[in-house]
Image (spheres, rainbow, N blue to C red):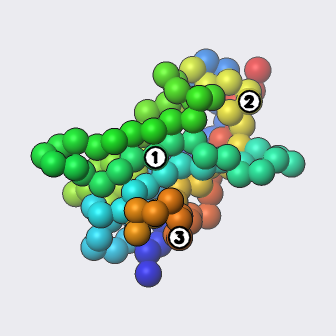
Amino acid sequence: QVQLVESGGGLVQAGDSLRLSCAASGRTFDNYRMAWFRQAPGKERDYVASITPRRGGSTYYLDYADSVKGRFIISRDNAKNTLYLQMNSLKPEDTAVYYCAADPQLDDDYYYWGQGTQVTVSS
């Protein structure tokens, strides 16, 4: 069983930055693909970004939704079992509940989810 706990959300103004964290339990965090998703009020949950396990040395493969590319940065600290999302140049349309998720089988099936953290960006 893996437990994911997000933190770092809050109310900010457009143009500000926030860093979200996701603390994971379990000893195999290093082997999971991890991702961030978000859900705005009245909308479906959307993919934001993902990061693979380490591939050869210190290489991770990162992927971003077009809507956040160039503004958000996903990273992980395997020693701390923690996933991060650095969000810069925030826009009102980034307002959502942000969830972290874990894909233990590396098959795009995000089996484990956190409870979410609210991010609100005012204009």
Task: Give the left or right position of residue 104, taking residue 17 as reference.
Answer: left
Q: What residue lies at 40% left-to-right and 62% top-to-bottom? A: 106
Q: Mark 3 or mark 2: name the one nearer the start of the chain.
A: 2
Q: Residue furthest right?
A: 42
Mark 2 neighbour density, 10 Å: few (under 14) some (14–19) many (20 or more): few
Examine the rendered structure and indicate whether residue 45 appears above or below residue 24. above
Measured Cα–Cα span from mark 2 to mark 1: 20 Å
Between disc 2 and disc 1, the foreground one is: 1
Task: Give the left or right position of residue 33, taking residue 101 as reference.
Answer: left
Q: Secondary structure at mark 2?
A: helix
Examine the rendered structure and indicate whether residue 98 appears above or below residue 29. above
Measured Cα–Cα span from mark 3 to mark 1: 14 Å
Image coordinates of residue 118 in percent, x first then y, are: 67, 48
Q: Amino acid at mark 3?
A: Tyr
Q: Amino acid at mark 2?
A: Glu
Image coordinates of residue 123 in percent, x first then y, are: 76, 20
| Position of the N terminus by quadrant | bottom left
Examine the rendered structure and indicate whether residue 9 appears above or below residue 109. above
Q: Secondary structure at mark 1?
A: strand
Residue hosting label 3: 111
Depth check, front residue: 77 or 46 = 46
Q: Mark 2 or mark 1: name the one nearer the start of the chain.
A: 1
Residue hosting label 1: 50
Depth check, front residue: 94 or 14 = 94
Dividing the picture into quarters, in which one does residue 82 lie?
Answer: bottom left
Q: Residue furthest front?
A: 107
Q: Residue 93 shows which numbered tag?
A: 2
Between disc 3 and disc 2, the foreground one is: 3
